[in-house]
């Protein structure tokens, strides 16, 4: 396939030259200094906590304005956190300072986290998919099954996003795989790249991947952020299958909604392309038979998926009685088994790739940002900033008396609005999930412990993946936008109704299915 994707436009968080970019860093620094150092210390908030609130606002402003690139923002946040915490009195022993060493340790703590390890090795797994061509083969086989009618091709693109979400734990990598295939189909069908059909397929590709970020725990880094904070704060590990049971029905319903919204807002010019099925078959033939490396990767991926699904489950779930019934099927968590499998794939003569294959294809900035994001959220919790902020938010807005469904409605709407200013769901989750947990815990305490904080946090994390409205709301949107097959207004016209449906569906399932599961 000779088709190439046009150069991607200036992507989110690259530190561009717009007015917003230029004022981002100075504005963020001014807010950090004013909130963290110049304002009077609020009652009940430690000095370190006040400075961490300043750093939280600094991070939000910097990420929202795209004043510097994400890797640079991560380095700045590490430095400021080291100084802020290191030069503050210890929260537990105010008579002594934290010290620069412990401050740096806190700033780098996210890089020793299992959630960070999972995201890092997941990017290596994505490289393995791309190197062997297994992802392309999987996508083409799905498109081959659905046929050449335009509506079927749209369904096929959604199915590709669904299936790849199980095997490629990186949204950007999934879209980067599918986009060249779609461009090849558009060219082979003889369709103009600015046609409604081309834009329809490309927007569907990006939106479907965002939807299945919700449905599958390992599909996106932001999910691991939430799972990590839930484990840190509540001591509860959400297994892969528990997440899937709760979230997959939502993603299925949203996939159906996506199909109808896209076909209504961007109806294709024709119903079927003659010879379309043959085009896809031709591309499959060009791939040839499955290589040895593809077969190795397929076996590894299936084994990995089985370990994820059975994480934390016991033999008792299969009705096996006796002493064995209480034993776990396997002792591995999601991160550990993924690290082990990826390590095997890197072993010479046994594996399928070399380190040199991975280095140029991995977005190291994402890995750095993810680790620093975990550090930021953890520091907000450890310095009591999250608890203090939650108490004031709950009191100011009267959330203590809100019903679980009303609380869900308010916080979900807040996350949707604030996501408009973010180019990364990972950054959004890093900044706000610890605050969301603290708010929910505060309300739960005020209501006598009737709120399911874990369940509500998990549902609100789904909302973090709603990058539906603007191309700049998610990296996968920008990859699709870089093909020049649709305009920003096209994306907005499909994204607004999709977001409204997504929000209403959160409320409907909150009142029914998730209430039945005990999460609301």
Image (cartoon, grey):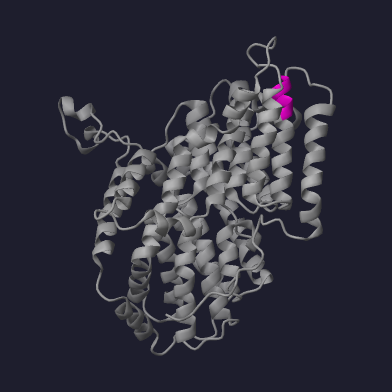
Classify residue 477 as left or right of residue 41. left
| Figure quadrant of residue 399 | top right
**Which is more toward the observer, 431 or 275?**
431
In-front residue for pair 491/288: 288
- Foreground: 180 or 270? 180
Q: Main secondary structure of the magenta part?
A: helix
| Residue under the image location 65 percent in, 16 percent down | 91
Range shown magenta: 46-51
Please name the residue shown 48% across and 33% down the image: 112
Can you give x and y, in whole percent of width and height, for residue 341 in the image? 31, 47
Q: Is residue 472 magenta?
A: no
The x, y position of residue 272, in whole percent, is: 44, 85
Please tell me whether residue 82 is drawn above or below residue 17 in the rendered image: above
Q: Residue, x 67% and y 69% (percent of image)?
A: 488
The image shows residue 322, relative to residue 332, as above or below, that is: above
Which residue extends farthest left?
A: 322
Q: Is residue 163 visible?
A: no
In the image, residue 292 sits, relative to residue 388, either above or below, namely: below
Q: Is residue 58 left or right of residue 159?
A: right
In this orientation, which residue lies closer to the viewer: 263 or 85? 85
Q: Is residue 60 visible?
A: yes
Please identify the quadrant where the N terminus is shown.
bottom left
Residue 425 position in % (x across, y down): 59, 49
Residue at 69% x, 70% y: name it.
Answer: 489
As for residue 49 lying within the magenta part, the answer is yes
Q: Residue furthest top?
A: 95
Q: Position of residue 373 (x, y in %)?
A: 59, 40
């Amino acid at each position: 396939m000779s088709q190439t994707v046009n150069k991607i436009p200036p992507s989110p968080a690259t530190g561009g030259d717009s007015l917003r970019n230029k004022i981002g860093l100075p504005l963020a620094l001014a807010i950090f200094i004013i909130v963290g150092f110049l304002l009077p210390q609020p009652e009940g908030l430690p000095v370190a906590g006040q400075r961490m609130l300043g750093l939280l606002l600094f991070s939000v402003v910097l990420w929202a304005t795209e004043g510097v690139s994400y890797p640079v923002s991560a380095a700045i946040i590490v430095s400021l956190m080291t100084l802020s915490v290191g030069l503050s009195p210890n929260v537990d022993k105010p008579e002594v300072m934290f010290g620069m060493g412990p401050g740096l340790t806190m700033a780098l703590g996210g890089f020793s986290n299992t959630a960070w390890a999972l995201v890092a090795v997941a990017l290596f797994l994505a490289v393995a998919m791309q190197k062997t061509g297994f992802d392309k083969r999987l996508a083409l086989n799905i498109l081959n099954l659905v046929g050449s009618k335009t509506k079927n091709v749209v369904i096929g693109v959604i199915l590709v996003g669904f299936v790849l979400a199980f095997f490629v734990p990186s949204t950007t990598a999934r879209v980067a795989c599918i986009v060249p295939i779609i461009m090849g189909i558009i060219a082979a069908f003889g369709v103009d790249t600015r046609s409604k059909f081309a834009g329809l397929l490309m927007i569907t590709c990006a939106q479907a991947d965002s939807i299945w970020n919700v449905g599958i725990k390992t599909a996106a880094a932001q999910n691991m952020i939430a799972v990590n904070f839930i484990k840190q704060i509540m001591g509860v590990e959400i297994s892969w299958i528990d997440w899937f049971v709760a979230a997959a029905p939502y993603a299925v319903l949203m996939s159906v909604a996506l199909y109808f919204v896209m076909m209504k807002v961007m109806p294709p010019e024709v119903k079927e392309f003659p010879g379309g099925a043959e085009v896809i078959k031709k591309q499959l033939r060009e791939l040839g038979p499955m290589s040895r490396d593809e077969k190795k990767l397929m076996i590894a991926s299936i084994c990995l998926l089985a370990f994820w699904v059975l994480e934390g489950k016991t033999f008792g779930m299969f009705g096996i009685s006796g002493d064995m019934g209480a034993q776990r099927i396997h002792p591995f968590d999601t991160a550990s088994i993924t690290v082990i499998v990826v390590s095997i794939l890197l072993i010479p003569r046994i594996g399928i790739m070399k380190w040199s294959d991975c280095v140029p294809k991995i977005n190291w900035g994402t890995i750095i940002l993810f680790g620093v994001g975990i550090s930021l959220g953890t520091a907000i919790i450890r310095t009591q900033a999250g608890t203090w902020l939650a108490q004031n938010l709950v009191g100011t807005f009267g959330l203590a008396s809100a019903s679980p469904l009303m609380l869900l409605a308010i916080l979900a709407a807040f996350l949707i609005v604030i996501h408009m200013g973010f180019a990364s769901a990972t950054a959004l989750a890093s900044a706000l999930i610890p605050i969301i947990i603290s708010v929910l815990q505060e309300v739960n305490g005020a209501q006598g412990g009737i709120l399911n904080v874990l369940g509500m946090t998990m549902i609100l994390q789904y909302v973090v993946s709603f990058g539906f409205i603007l191309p700049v709301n998610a990296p996968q949107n920008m990859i699709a936008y870089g093909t020049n097959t649709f305009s920003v207004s096209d994306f907005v016209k499909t994204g607004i109704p999709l977001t409204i449906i997504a929000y209403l569906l959160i409320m409907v399932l909150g009142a029914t299915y998730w209430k039945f599961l005990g999460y609301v």
